[in-house]
Image: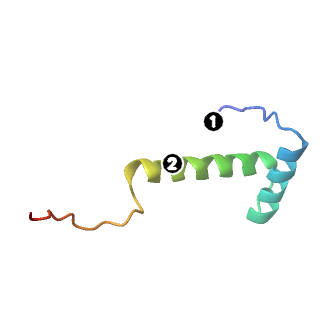
């Protein structure tokens, strides 16, 4: 995988550090990758509709 440089301000680095500690990761880069993968999974779930309640749609008889 290509190496990317993370350009983050102090607040973003604090957030990445908190995620790193919470998830037991070694580096902030791993925390960044964790958050990115999580966001992609959540977006994919919304796109495919997985996780939504499924129920039959009936017609109303008039």
| Residue under label 1 | 1
CB under 8 Å between callouts 2 and 1?
no
Q: Name the secondary structure under disc 2.
A: helix
Q: What secondary structure is found at the residue carrying circle 1?
A: loop
Where 8 sits versus 33, above or below?
above
Which x, y percent locates residue 49? 38, 54
> Looking at the image, which residue is at 78% across and 32% down?
5
The first of marks 2 and 1 along the sequence is 1
Going by the picture, which residue comes out furthest to the right?
10
Q: Which residue in the protein does label 2 denote?
A: 43
| Quadrant housing the C terminus | bottom left
- Depth order, front residue of 50/56: 56
The answer to which quarter of the image holds residue 60 is bottom left
Q: Position of residue 50 (x, y in %)?
A: 39, 58
- Figure check: 16 above or below 9: below
How crowded pointer 1 is (Cα within 10 Å; few <14, some 14-19, many 20+) is rated as few
| Residue at the farthest front position | 62
């Amino acid at each position: 995988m290509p190496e990317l440089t993370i350009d983050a301000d102090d607040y973003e680095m604090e957030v990445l550090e908190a995620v790193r500690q919470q998830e037991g990761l070694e580096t902030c880069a791993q925390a960044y990758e964790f958050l990115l993968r999580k966001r992609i999974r959540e977006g994919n779930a919304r796109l495919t509709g997985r996780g939504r309640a499924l129920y039959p749609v009936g017609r109303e008889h008039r």
